[in-house]
Image: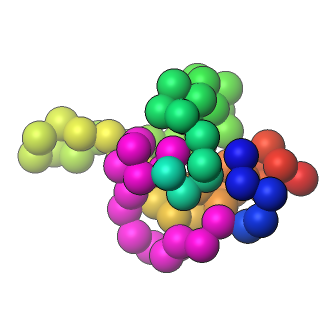
Amino acid sequence: MTPSKPVCDPDRRYSQKEAAQILAVERHTIRRYELAGCIRFQIRKAGRQKFTTGQQIIKCWEAVYL
């Protein structure tokens, strides 16, 4: 995981892949964080894709890194 606070827009929606890139981890690690309750994802109605917000990404980084 990146040692510095991730730079992202707290109100923007991010896919699992984008969240992994921002946190500098693999996608399967994002899935583990989701199962552990560290980051929450929602499902878009159109396309049924998972997304999270920048605020969730920052909260996950704080929970794991700090």
Q: How is the image coloured?
A: rainbow
- Judging depth in this view, the residue of 52 and 45 nearest the camera is 52
In this view, the residue farthest toward the left is 46
**Residue at coordinates 59% horizontally, 29% vertically from top-left?**
29
Q: Quadrant of residue 33?
A: top right
- Residue 34 in sight: no
In this view, the residue farthest toward the right is 66
- Residue 57 in sight: yes
Image x and y of residue 56, in percent? 57, 56
The magenta span reads: 6-20
Total numbered circles: 0
Question: Is 16 inside the magenta-drawn segment?
Answer: yes
Image x and y of residue 57, in percent? 58, 55
Vertical comparison of 1 with 55: above or below: above
**Residue at coordinates 65% horizontally, 66% vertically from top-left?**
6
Vertical comparison of 26 with 56: above or below: above
Question: Is 31 inside the magenta-drawn segment?
Answer: no
**Residue at coordinates 18% horizontally, 36% vertically from top-left?**
48
Judge left or right: residue 19 versus residue 48.
right
Judge left or right: residue 22 versus residue 45.
right
Image x and y of residue 49, in percent? 24, 39
**Residue at coordinates 39% horizontally, 44% vertically from top-left?**
17
Image x and y of residue 1, in percent? 71, 46
